[in-house]
């Protein structure tokens, strides 16, 4: 059966051996059985540049390269791995996509993204996002010594952890209706949205131009479990995974 799969928010690192194993096993299970794989950001817990690779980054690249021989792999960067570049993409056999991309699958128009750009109530984060995604600033960051980049990343992760503990799953950290509508206005052909980032897997419905647009929020991966969205000619559904 024709199917395309979407994943996000795995946050892989050398400190998550069970998740790493779950991903590699799942990728092997999908080999030759899917039309394409889309990774919608925060695939890695942190990315300091293509010249600083963790063990799992090397292992994942090798596995994705093999997988890409039977199905294309597309990658949208998230707020954790926005510095991932073309060198790693070539090593892993993946195709980098822009922050927001409109695609057509099995006759349906989908709008895909990491999703953080639609969390418009989180004003400080949106300000930070605009600054950190500036291409010139990214070039400056990547030009820094590796030791300096590691220190900056540690500070950002610490600040993110502190903010998450303070805010939790409050509405301000979620996608907003105005954010969704802004995305749909820029891509009026959209029939469904797919994104991650919020760690709130669900299916939502939004009114737009007199019709209903579904929004699929991808599952995050944690501990020994995760999930994905399967899209086929019959529609889309969220499915969960568990490490055996």
Image (cartoon, rainbow, N blue to C red):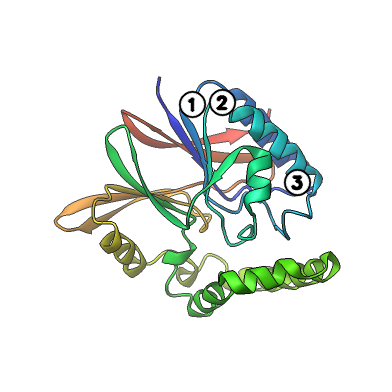
Contact (Cβ within 8 Å) of mark 2 with mark 3: no
Q: Earlier in the sequence, mark 2 or mark 3?
A: 3
* Residue underneath mark 2: 30
Residue 97 can be seen, yes or no: yes
State the CA–CA distance, disc 2 to disc 3: 21 Å
Discs 2/3, front? 2
Seen at 82% across and 71% down, the residue is 148
Label whose residue precedes the other's in the sequence (3 or 1) = 3
Q: Residues within 10 Å of mark 3 (few under 14, many from 20)?
A: some
Query: Where is 127 relative to 243, above or below?
Result: below
- Say which mark, if any, is on residue 90: none
Image x and y of residue 231, in percent:
39, 34
Residue ID for mark 3: 16
Front residue of this view, candidates 204 and 60: 60
Number of numbered discs overlaid on the protein picture: 3
On the picture, is 189 further left or further right than 87? left
- Distance of mark 3 from mark 1, alpha carbons? 26 Å
Locate the C terminus by quadrant.
top right
Q: How crowded is mark 1: few (under 14 residues within 10 Å), some or many (20 or more)?
A: some
Q: Which residue is drawn at 40% across and 52% down?
A: 101
Q: Residue furthest left?
A: 210
Cβ–Cβ under 8 Å for marks 1 and 2 = yes
Determine crowd level at label 2: few under 14, some 14-19, many 20+ residues with C-alpha closer than 10 A: some
Residue bearing mark 1: 34
| Residue 222 visible in the snapshot | no
The kind of secondary structure element at disc 2 is helix
- Foreground mark, 3 or 1? 1
What x and y, as percent, mark residue 136?
60, 73
| Residue 73 horizontal side relative to residue 161, left or right | left
Distance in Å between CA atoms under marks 1 and 2 = 6 Å
């Amino acid at each position: 059966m024709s199917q395309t799969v979407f994943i996000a928010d795995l946050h892989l690192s050398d400190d998550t051996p069970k998740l790493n194993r779950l991903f590699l096993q799942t990728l092997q299970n999908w080999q030759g059985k899917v039309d394409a794989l889309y990774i919608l950001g925060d695939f890695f817990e942190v990315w300091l540049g293509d010249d600083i690779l963790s063990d799992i980054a090397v292992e994942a690249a090798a596995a994705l390269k093999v997988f890409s021989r039977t199905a294309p792999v597309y990658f949208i960067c998230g707020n954790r791995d926005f510095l991932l570049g073309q060198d790693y993409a070539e090593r892993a056999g993946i195709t980098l996509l822009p922050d927001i991309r409109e695609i057509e699958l099995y006759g349906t128009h989908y709008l895909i993204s990491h999703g953080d750009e639609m969390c418009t109530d989180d004003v400080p984060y949106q300000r930070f996002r605009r600054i950190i995604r500036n291409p010139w600033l990214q070039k400056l960051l990547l030009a820094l010594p590796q030791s300096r980049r590691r220190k900056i990343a540690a500070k950002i992760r610490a600040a993110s952890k502190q903010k998450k503990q303070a805010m939790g799953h409050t509405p301000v950290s979620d996608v907003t209706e105005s954010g969704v509508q802004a995305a749909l206005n820029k891509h009026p052909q959209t029939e469904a949205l797919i994104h991650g980032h919020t760690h709130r897997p669900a299916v939502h419905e939004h009114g737009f131009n007199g019709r209903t647009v579904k929004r699929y929020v991808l599952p995050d991966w944690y501990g020994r479990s995760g999930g994905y969205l399967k899209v086929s000619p019959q529609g889309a559904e969220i499915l969960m995974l568990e490490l055996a």
